[in-house]
Image (cartoon, rainbow, N blue to C red):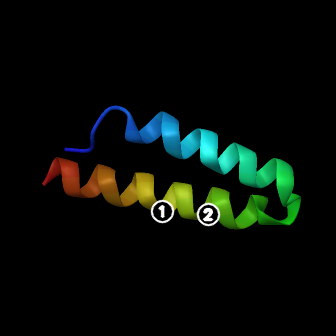
Amino acid sequence: MIHPVVGPVVAIIAGILILIFPELLNIVVAIYLIAVGLIGLVGTV
């Protein structure tokens, strides 16, 4: 189980990185979607 604080902290860090480096948007979104998908699959097993 992921600690409840991890999600919001990751979101804040990703948001700051996107503001500083807008070209990272595609990469950050892709990593987020892959991570959420993997966590969802592992959590249901």
In depth, the one of 21 and 32 nearer the eye is: 21
Which residue is at 83% across, 48% downward?
19
Q: Look at the image and tell me in which quarter the C terminus lies.
A: bottom left
Q: Is residue 15 left or right of residue 38?
A: right
Mark 2 neighbour density, 10 Å: few (under 14) some (14–19) many (20 or more): few
Answer whether labels 2 and 1 touch (C-beta < 8 Å). yes
Q: Position of residue 26 (x, y in %)?
A: 74, 63
Q: Image quadrant for the N terminus?
A: top left
Q: Residue, x 58% and y 41% (percent of image)?
A: 11
Residue tagged by mark 2? 30
Question: Which residue is depicted at the point 84% across and 60% down?
Answer: 21
Kindly give the residue lying farthest to the left in the view shown.
45
x, y (%) of residue 32?
54, 55
Residue identifier under label 1: 34
Query: Counting other residues with Cα less than 10 Å from the Cα at mark 1, is it few (<14), some (14-19), or many (20 or more)?
Result: few
Identify which residue, 25 or 16, lies in the foreground.
Answer: 16
Task: Give the left or right position of residue 13, taking residue 17 as reference.
Answer: left
Q: At numbered mark 1, what does the secondary structure look like: helix, strand or loop?
A: helix
Q: Spatial distance from mark 2 to mark 1, Cα to Cα?
A: 6 Å
Amino acid carrying mark 1 in the image: Ile
Residue situated in front as seen by the camera: 42 or 13 = 13
Q: Please, is residue 38 above or below residue 13 in the view?
A: below
What type is the residue that disc 2 sits on? Ala
* Residue 35 coordinates in the image, percent (x, y): 43, 59
Q: On residue 43, which mark appears?
A: none
Residue 20 shown left or right of residue 32 in the figure? right
Residue 14's spot in the image, x, y percent? 65, 50
